[in-house]
Image (tube, rainbow, N blue to C red):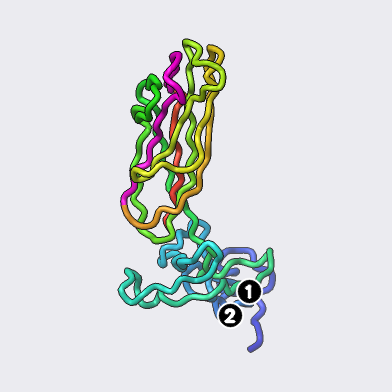
């Protein structure tokens, strides 16, 4: 088909009439594309991967391997199959609206702070306010945790005596302690980080504190004692 000549288009209607014969959305290499969800349309700039403005994100493992949902999975039939993004692969090309991202690592963040100071004894005790609950729904769910305790030594505990913070998940002590020095009189922040796979179900995460010996006076205090959790519910 020959393309009609409109001279030098000078108005929007001239341009629209010219595009009446263009190959809009016909194929990937078309000159023009509308916005939508099909393979030859472009994605809106504010797309949400909700299967309305663009394709829904697939479920993948941490290595990017597709995890095929079982028949009872709460997914529409047309979302149970997928492949890699089918874009041209050129940095200057538009992404097709049915493209899919390689992972689903969108974390949920939680943070709590001590509501009052805990005077440390020789036995573990909960630090007031430094407890939270997460409810992962996937078997591969994991958390990245940062715990910080503001140790305040008001009467020297003594050299070689540690100030200790310990992480508990579902009542189980986790390896990796938050440690402070019991001497001299001072205030200091001490931190630790953890990576833990949780699995499915509600989990209580909390910090406890103690001294390694029943001497001196020290506390885990406010306002800097806190617990931060990133939940990746895969």
Judge whether residue 213 is colored magenta.
Answer: yes
Displayed quadrant of residue 219: top left
Report crowding for label 2: few under 14, some 14 to 19, many 20 or more residues within 10 A (C-alpha). few
From the viewer's perspective, is 202 left or right of 107? left
Task: State the extent of the magenta-drawn residues as a range.
Answer: 202-221
Residue corresponding to mark 2: 27
CA gap, disc 2 and disc 1: 9 Å
From the viewer's perspective, is 26 left or right of 145? right
Q: Quadrant of the N terminus?
A: bottom right
**In the figure, 222 relative to 32: above or below?**
above
Q: Residue at x 49, y 25 (%)?
A: 163
Report crowding for label 1: few under 14, some 14 to 19, many 20 or more residues within 10 A (C-alpha). few
Q: Residue at x 33, y 71 (%)?
A: 73
**In the figure, 24 relative to 101: above or below?**
below
- Closer to viewer: mark 2 or mark 1: 2
Q: Position of residue 30 (x, y in %)?
A: 61, 77
Front residue of this view, candidates 127 and 141: 127
Secondary structure mostly seen in the magenta stretch: strand
Q: Position of residue 131 (x, y in %)?
A: 35, 36
Q: Which mark is residue 31?
A: 1
Say if residue 34 shows up in the picture: no
């Amino acid at each position: 088909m020959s393309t009609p000549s409109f001279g030098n288009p000078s108005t929007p209607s001239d341009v629209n009439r010219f595009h009446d014969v263009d190959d809009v959305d016909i194929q990937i290499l078309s000159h023009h594309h509308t916005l939508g969800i099909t393979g030859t349309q472009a994605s809106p700039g504010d797309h949400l991967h909700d299967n309305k403005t663009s394709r829904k994100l697939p479920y993948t493992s941490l290595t990017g391997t597709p995890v095929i949902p079982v028949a009872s999975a709460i997914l529409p039939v047309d979302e149970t199959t997928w492949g890699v993004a089918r874009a041209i692969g050129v940095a200057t090309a538009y992404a097709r609206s049915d493209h899919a991202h390689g992972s689903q690592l969108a974390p949920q963040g939680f943070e709590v702070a001590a509501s009052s100071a805990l005077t440390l004894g020789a036995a573990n005790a909960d630090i007031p306010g430094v407890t939270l609950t997460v409810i992962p729904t996937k078997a591969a769910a994991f958390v990245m945790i940062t715990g910080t305790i503001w140790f305040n030594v008001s009467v020297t505990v003594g050299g070689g005596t540690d100030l200790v913070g310990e992480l508990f998940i579902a009542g189980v002590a986790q390896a990796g302690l938050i440690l402070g020095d019991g001497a001299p009189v001072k205030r200091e922040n001490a931190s630790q980080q953890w990576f833990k796979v949780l699995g499915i179900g509600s989990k209580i995460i909390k910090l406890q504190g103690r001294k390694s010996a029943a001497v001196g006076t020290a506390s885990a205090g406010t306002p800097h004692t806190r617990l931060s959790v990133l939940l990746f519910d895969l």
